[in-house]
Image (spheres, rainbow, N blue to C red):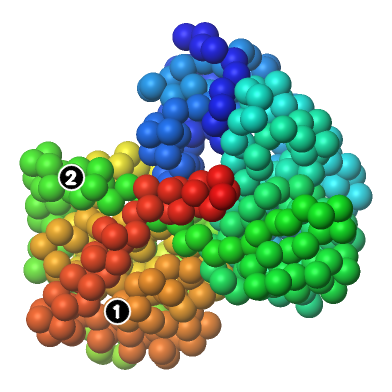
Amino acid sequence: MAASSTSSFVVVANRLPVDRVPESEGSGFRPSPGGLVTALEPVLRSHGGIWIGWPGSSLGDDDVFEADGLKLKPIELSDQDVEQYYEGMSNGTLWPLYHDVVAKPAFRREWWDAYVQVNRRFAETTARCAAHGAVVWVQDYQLQLVPAMLREMRPDVTIGFFLHIPFPPSELFKQLPWRDQILKGLLGADLVGFQRPGGAANFARLVRLRQGHKTHRDKILLGDGRQVAARAYPISIDFQRLEQLAKSQSVMARTEEICREIGGDRRILLGVDRLDYTKGIRQRLRAFGELIVDGAISVDDAVFVQVASPSRERVQQYVEVREDIERWVGRINGNLGRIGRQPVHYVHSSYPREEMAALFQAADVMVVTPFADGMNLVAKEYVTCRHKNDGALVLSEFAGASDELKQAFLVNPHDINGLKEAMLAAMRADPRDLSRRMRAMRKQVREHDITAWANAFLADLAA
Ligand code: F6P
């Protein structure tokens, strides 16, 4: 349905909250992947406004339209844009660089050119969709040039920027051949938000060192008299909505079914991730396999369920990580399983929210082991679904969520022995200890939900 094409509140993100399903697969829309969408969809729903982004397939720019009560403005990416701006500069250069160089970033000049061009198209479309004096909220590493480009086109609008992934220390960021352009792009915003205080501090340090701007506490003082604030706003989820879903009869019934089917009297350990090399999936599977080999657990008392949703499948490093993980699953099941008793259940697929809520409730231990992660909303989703205050969370100290979920079993995912100890401790913990931990974590997420996050950011932006 066509809808009014300007608004006083505009969210700009690489992806729309829904992907357009190609005609060959039945057409229509499906929720798009990733934590950004999970977090921001309820924000747009409550604030109204327009969401500008890519519908995940190259079908042509359309007018603003309405889908499931949200006003959406699609931006087309050509096959070449997808290859150079999305798979190339965004996910072949910036993603590994910002995630502690877990994989090697590639620096390609044609990718950079495409990144500049696509960012300009996003800025131009935003300039057309924003009403006079509008608040524009630009999201994530794919669009870091948009704030400055938009400010030049539309000095009347207020611009916020939020980075959903880690912002690296200057020693890594300085490798980027286009480091100064990115910093200038971000400084076009009035407020730049990060997941963790360390990200905000890295950014402030860089603009001081490289651009010579003065900083005072969390303010950056630009030469032209403008001030830019750089602060941490740890992102969250819609606690109420997810908890309600988890408590629904259908989800509870499905939980019981999953426990019967794969658990029985076995403890269920669970991993849920986009299939990404930053997530430490192999390390957690390896730790689990070694626990069986050591005799600490057996295939009769524990099972590991790994849901890996397909992601960025044409990027070489993602092809390799999939092969690697599937080799490990095969090896563990082949060496340690027997007919009818698989130690690892692995699915390369994404599931609807209902199924995920049931899985979270079925899992005795949730294992979240990224090497670097802006926040990791899966950890917060698990905690939200545990409305009986049971279950254990094993969480990497390198995930932003570890700042808040301090009662988790915190681990360094590079340390396989430490990981084994934490998984074992989580499986063997006293239920009273688990309940105490879970209550504290649930309180934290309930009191710092997505509404609190959006309100804090938008209030500071308005101020
Ligand atoms: O949270 C990081 C992020 O890259 C988001 O920007 C994105 O929505 C999500 O992960 C999924 O990634 P992609 O859009 O590349 O599938």
- Look at 11% across and 62% down and name the residue there: 388
Q: Position of residue 80 (x, y in %)?
A: 79, 33
Residue 37, given in percent of the width and then of the height, sits at: 47, 42
Residue 391 or 48: which is nearer the viewer? 48
Quarter residue 227 falls in: bottom right
The reply to whether dot 1 and dot 2 touch (C-beta < 8 Å) is no
Label for residue 407? 1
Q: Residues within 10 Å of mark 1 (few under 14, many from 20)?
A: some
- Mark 2 residue element: helix
Classify 63 as above or below 300.
above
Residue 229's place in the image compared with 139, above or below, is below
Check disc 1 and report its element: helix, strand or loop: loop
Q: Position of residue 185 (x, y in %)?
A: 79, 49
Instruction: Give the class, few, some or many, for how many residues have Cα within 10 Å of label 2's Cα (few <14, many ≥20).
Output: few
Extreme residue toward the top, this view: 2
Q: Nearer the viewer, residue 380 or 307?
A: 380
Amino acid found under the numbered disc labelled 1: Gln
Tag 2 residue: 244
Res 330 quadrant in image:
bottom left
Picture coordinates of residue 377 (x, y %)? 41, 57
Residue shown at 48% from the left, 68% from the top: 400
> Type of residue at label 2?
Gln
Q: For this rendering, which residue is in front, 419 or 178?
A: 178
Specify whether 23 is left or right of 345: right
State how far apart marks 1 and 2 are (Cα). Answer: 23 Å
Note whether residue 275 is visible: yes
Q: Horizontally, is 375 left or right of 124 in the view? A: left
* Residue 201 figure quarter: bottom right
